[in-house]
Image: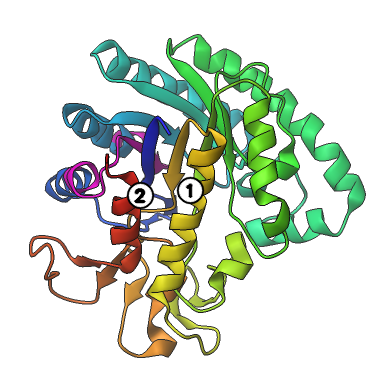
Amino acid sequence: MRAKGIGYDTGLERGGRFNRPFDPDLVRRELTIIRDDLHCTAVRLIGTDLDRIDHAGREAAELGLEIWFSPFPWDRTPDEILALLADGAARAERLRSAGAEVVFVTGAELSLFNHGFLPGESVSGRVGRLLASRDLVAGLPARVNAFLARAVEAVRARFGGRVTYAAVPLERVDWAPFDIVSVDAHRSKEVEAGYREGVRSLVAAGKPVAITEFGVTPYRGAADLGARCGEIVEYDGDVPVRLKGEYVRDEQEQARYLRELVEIFEAEGVDAAFACTFVCYGLVHRADPRTDLDMASWGVVKVLEEGTGEAYPDVPWEPKAAFGALAACYEVR
């Protein structure tokens, strides 16, 4: 596998609040750990704020990491998405022109997280109506591909590097305008039997293939749920407060899942893969299982409620078993 990567959340803003702090020293330290200790050669920089992605991109470039510049539109209209992507493409081109290796990701799962593609005011509402209606499923690809044709045109007018899009399978993206086929590919119990063959079929189409998301959360049974494994949190407004039921923490299940999928990607000729994800600052680890929000976190590190870690005394988190597992998979042998 050419590019061994991980997703790095620079911050998602909703209702005027970001889900993580953005301290430049902390960002630099985390990206250095991603390169040196996780042995990543690439990082997917995700966020709603282009200034944050831009800053993290400059830090990643100095570290020699391949940058996947990935604006994440959320709760936006198609015109608002186009404006964000155009601005992001211009910023990504400045990084590329300065010598960095940059891939531009033209949004991610746009139909689920934004307005204008599916009925519903929230992600859960849109997903629920989509799964309940064959007509919506059948009509979705045409709407998504019509928008992506406009988006790619706007991006390529400003960015001279490789371009892709982080898709979910139901969107059935037309990959002709793109340089790389990229899919968020979480394996669940329902698709496990055909998962390897699905990856193989993507590679067989001829273009480089990237898995822009793969991963699971650290509790027993999470691997069976795939992309739905994080849906175990009760919220007070937008603030996570506790888990919805009783769950058993199992860091080894998360670690095993990452190992198994990396082995599949390497065996089937995937060009790039990005584990989901490095850290989820809004989901704090606690000793009490009912309030251990880290069990809903995709991060390979667990955020501490107070203080700093033992492995890295200058950061507010501790590596999980998944950290070591991924580092071992990515280390050049």
Reading the image, the residue beneath label 1 is: 263
Residue 72 horizontal/vertical position (percent): 48, 41
Reading the image, the residue beneath label 2 is: 329
Q: From the viewer's perspective, is 154 left or right of 37?
A: right
The quadrant where residue 198 appears:
top right
Identify the amino acid type marked 2.
Cys
Task: Return the residue found at the far right.
Answer: 135
The quadrant where residue 255 appears:
bottom left
Q: Can residue 117 be seen here? A: no
Task: Return the residue found at the far left.
Answer: 313
Q: Nearer the viewer, residue 56 or 226?
A: 226
- Mark 1 vs 2: CB contact within 8 A: yes
Q: From the viewer's perspective, is 208 left or right of 17?
A: right
Q: Can residue 254 be seen here? A: yes
Identify the amino acid type marked 1.
Glu
Q: Which residues are magenta?
A: 32-51
Residue 204 horizontal/vertical position (percent): 67, 27
Q: Is residue 21 magenta?
A: no
